[in-house]
Image (tube, rainbow, N blue to C red):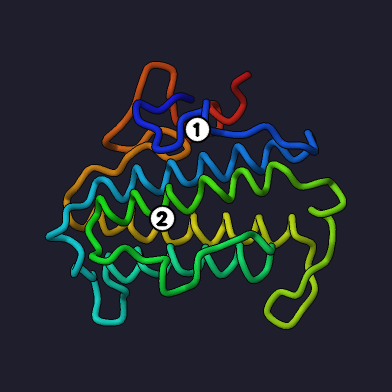
Amino acid sequence: MTYSDSAIPDVKIPAAHASGYQHAIDIYAGETNKTVSVWRQLKDADLTYRPHAKSSSVQEIFKHQLLSERRFFGEFLGTPEPPPGAVLPAEISVDSACLRLVELALPRLEFLAARTSEWWLEPVPFFGVQRTRIWVFWRRVLHSAHHRTQLSVYLRLLDKPVPSIYGPTADVTWTGATPTNSVEAAGRR
């Protein structure tokens, strides 16, 4: 599947020193691109939107994504990170948040690509337990996907298009992108 817009183009994705971990580098770049594609569907006027009083606003989710990635990567994986006070843009806008997400991701990609297999498999402290770095990495990817999904629901509630993430949506499709929503489709080869 190819996307019309990539915040991190393929040419900026480094080769992994431990080739068995190239998938992690590729996926982190791809997940960052997917997050930016969802964020770009929003407008600055949407930053205060929250579908329910108990829900986070768009701006709060942007801030959480930026700050929690910094914590996961810096505290648990040991990547060099800016101090927490330097993570958020001076003024939050859709453009500034997208730009900052990519600015923070690029050096992480370089750092992660340079690690050995042993580094990825080393247990590290994670919220009071020990987990391997690759486990923590996948937990971060899933955490980011969770918040991206929140914002995809917000897009639908705001009657804005939902971009393709892992396949077609009601708003974006292409030839050959047939959904698997029947027994017959599940048996295709």
Residue 96 located left or right of residue 49: right
Residue 123 located left or right of residue 135: right
Which sits in the foreground, 67 or 49? 67
Residue at image location 40% in from the left, 28% down from the top: 3
Q: Quadrant of residue 162?
A: top left
Identify the element where label 2 is drawn.
Answer: helix
Q: Position of residue 136 (x, y in %)?
A: 69, 62
Label located before the other in sequence (1 or 2): 2
Residue at image location 42% in from the left, 66% down from the top: 87
Query: Quick one: which residue is furthest to the right in this view?
Result: 118
Identify the element where label 1 is drawn.
Answer: loop
The total number of labels drawn is: 2
Residue 172 located left or right of residue 48: right
Query: Residue beneath label 2, please?
Result: 148
Residue at image location 17% in from the left, 61% down from the top: 46
Q: Position of residue 183 (x, y in %)?
A: 55, 33
Q: Please, is residue 51 above or below residue 26 in the view?
A: below
Type of amino acid at the residue the image marks with label 2? Arg
Residue at image location 40% in from the left, 33% down from the top: 6
* Disc 1 packing (10 Å; few <14; some 14–19; many ≥20): few
Query: Residue beneath label 1, please?
Result: 180
Mark 1 or mark 2: which is in front? 2
Q: Are marks 1 and 2 in contact (CB under 8 Å)?
A: no
Q: Position of residue 40 (x, y in %)?
A: 27, 46
Q: Position of residue 89 (x, y in %)?
A: 31, 63
Query: Quick one: which residue is furthest to the left in this view?
Result: 45
Which sits in the foreground, 159 or 141? 141
Residue 72 located left or right of residue 119: left
Residue 5's tag is: none
Q: Quadrant of residue 127?
A: bottom right
